[in-house]
Image (tube, rainbow, N blue to C red):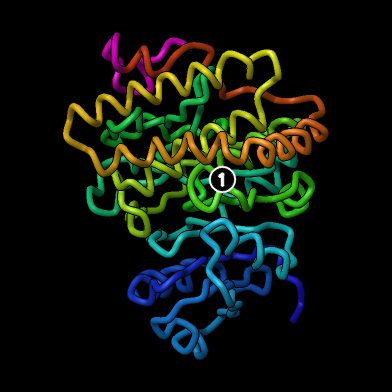
Amino acid sequence: MSIPKVAIVLLSYNSLDLLKKFLPEIQAFTPSSADYQIYVIDNASTDGTWDYLENQERVERIRIEINRGFTNGYVESLAQIQAEYYVLISSDIEVTENWCEPIINYMDAHPNVAASGPKIMSYDRRTEFEYAGAAGGFIDHMGYPFCRGRMVNVAEIDRGQYDDEMEVFWVSGACMFLRAKDYHAVGGLDNNFYAHMEEIDLSWRLKLVGHEVHCYPKSKVYHMGGYIIKYGSSAKVYQNHRNNLVMLLKNLPFRKLLWVIPLRMCLDVLTLLKMYADGEFKASTGINRAHYHFLLYFRRWWKSRKDVQSLKHNPNLSGIYPKSMVWKFFVQGKKEYHQLDW
């Protein structure tokens, strides 16, 4: 088979119902030229996914024999796929007409943009931005992520207020466009993350070598969100808190690392106490496990830091909010992105 320009890579684990629902739209709304090829990665499913895909038009199947997590599914599959661009898309994404080609054209015209993404809306609440990505992501100076259209747990109604294309700090792994050569040059997704924040970590590395990450809101998709790991569950709390600490350790400048990591762990304890007060006892165990594993495998994370820091060249740090988003949100009551003073 000839090498396509664009490889649309959909990762699925026991998501046959979602494939039946959303794959036909990807097939219908993706250009039919030889430049575009759809790949579905069967991440060791046991629900008949592999057989269902056998007769799907324009779909190439790749089987992962052992499910070692969301991130590993992409790590293994992308090593087998050649293309100029990768489009990573979760099985719980509903695409719309012209969701793909305009972003590819935009990246063609802007060669320093290594990653981009569409506007991500809630599948269930169609007028709201979705938690995981909205209209482009940022982090504050202590590493807390937030989005245009979503601050902490408050999602805005889309009124067209963020329809301008702009440089951001990260775009969602639920639907992420990547220039393949840049993806591989910085080492790709970090398999240690398993799931959650792996796209922020990847975006950060791309920016550490001087590339740009953009959101292109003229393209739009809808995300179910929390389908694989439920929002508020102990597993999601664990992955988010552990991976955030690992990401900071890998990417922050050393001087900032010395105070940000201890402060973040103290703030995590405050979050833990609030969970106790709210009766979220099961979810709160995720923070304890996150800290335990962060410290237990510290030498592993430190080795990853050395690898990342050796890549750093002409870093582009636009998209880091120089103040505390958490303070603005909880103390000053600024619940929407446009209320932040950059």
**Res. 23 image quadrant:** bottom left
180 with respect to 193 (left or right) = right
Quarter the N terminus occupies: bottom right
Of residues 47 and 267, the one drawn nearer to the viewer in this rendering: 267
320 with respect to 29 (left or right) = right
Q: Which residue is mark 1?
A: 198
Is residue 129 shown above or below 51?
A: above
Please report the residue visible at 77 percent of the width from the left and 34 percent of the height from the top. Answer: 306
The stretch in magenta equals 330-342
Please report the residue visible at 43 percent of the width from the left and 60 percent of the height from the top. Answer: 97
Asked if the magenta segment contains residue 202, the reply would be no
239 with respect to 38 (left or right) = left
Q: Residues within 10 Å of mark 1 (few under 14, many from 20)?
A: many
Q: Residue 96, how many percent across, how many down?
A: 40, 59
**Res. 129 image quadrant:** top left
Is residue 27 shown above or below 289?
A: below
Please report the residue visible at 56 percent of the width from the left and 48 percent of the height from the top. Answer: 193
Asked if the magenta segment contains residue 333, the reply would be yes
Name the secondary structure under disc 1: helix
Q: Residue 144, how many percent across, how many down?
A: 46, 26
Q: Residue 213, how many percent across, how many down?
A: 62, 36
Of residues 153 and 84, the one drawn nearer to the viewer in this rendering: 153
Main secondary structure along the magenta-highlighted residues: loop
Q: Residue 52, how many percent across, how many down?
A: 44, 86
Figure disc tally: 1
The amino acid type of the residue labelled 1 equals: Glu
**Res. 78 image quadrant:** bottom right
Of residues 183 and 296, the one drawn nearer to the viewer in this rendering: 296
Please report the residue visible at 40 percent of the width from the left and 39 percent of the height from the top. Answer: 134
